[in-house]
Structure formats: C-alpha cells, structure tokens
Amino acid sequence: MTDADETFLKPDAARAGAQRLGVAGATLASRWAQHAATISSLNASAPWGTDEPGQGFNKHYLEGGDKAPATSVLSGGKTIVDLIKVLGPDVLSAVDGTVEVDDMVDKWFGGDGK
C-alpha cells in the first residue's frame, strides 16, 4: 500500500474541528428557533389582512397542510438545522472511534504505537 492509499488522522485537530462544528450547529439551531418563532408569530397575526385579497394570499400561503409554503419552509428548515446540529458530535464520536480502533489494532498486532 502506498501513502496515497492511506488515510491519516490528527486526532487533536479533528476533535477541535468537531467541537467548533458542534458550537456552530448549536448556535444555528438556537438562532433558527428564534427566527422560526418570529415567523410563526407574524404568520399568526395575518399581516396581509382578512379582506378578500388577504384571504386569497392566506389560502395559498398558510392553508394546505404540509404542502403550504409557510409550513414547508419552516419544517424543511428545521429538518436541515437538526441535521447540522448533530454533525459536530457525530464527527467527534467518529474521531474517538477511529482512535480507539487504531489503538486496539496496534495492541493486537504489536505495532510500535505510531
């Protein structure tokens, strides 16, 4: 096997990156929750009005269940944010698992610890 076929991991650097990613994901989730709450509050107050044009807008914007634009944007955004929020912890777990397996293989086969 050549060096080009191998993968090298700098555990400390990868852990630090995973922790930064975790903080970014948590920050994004917090800000998304705030913005989504604001949007939901604004939607609930129907700023477009209750006259005929306002009702027409509302029919296409909020009504229609999960397919309504307002609903699909908020639920789709939450889905994406929830996935990003767990990236840091998942990467950290993967790094720790990789190091653990590497240490175990080294122990089993009597490597020199490098």
Image (tube, grey):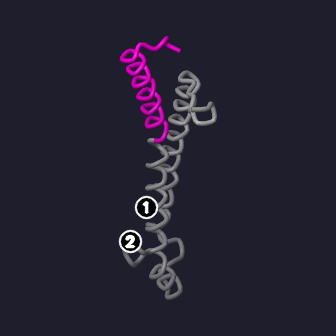
Residue drawn 54% across the image and 76% down it: 48
Residue drawn 48% across the image and 41% down it: 87
**Label 2: how many residues lie within 10 Å, few (<14), some (14-19) or many (20+)?**
few
| Relative image position of residue 83 (x, y in whole percent) | 45, 49
Q: Which residues are magenta?
A: 87-114
Tell me if residue 24 comes above or below residue 16 in the rendering.
below
| Three-letter code for the amino acid on which mark 2 is drawn | Asp
Q: Quadrant of residue 12?
A: top right
Residue drawn 44% across the image and 33% down it: 94
Query: Disc number at residue 96?
Result: none
Camera-side residue of 72 and 11: 11
As for residue 89 lying within the magenta part, the answer is yes
The answer to the question of whether label 2 and label 1 lie on touching residues, with beta carbons closer than 8 A, is yes
Give the residue furthest to the right.
Answer: 4
Query: Disc number at residue 66?
Result: 2
| Relative image position of residue 100 (x, y in whole percent) | 40, 23
Report helix, strand or loop for mark 2.
helix
| Relative image position of residue 8 (x, y in whole percent) | 57, 28
Which residue has dot 1 on it?
A: 75
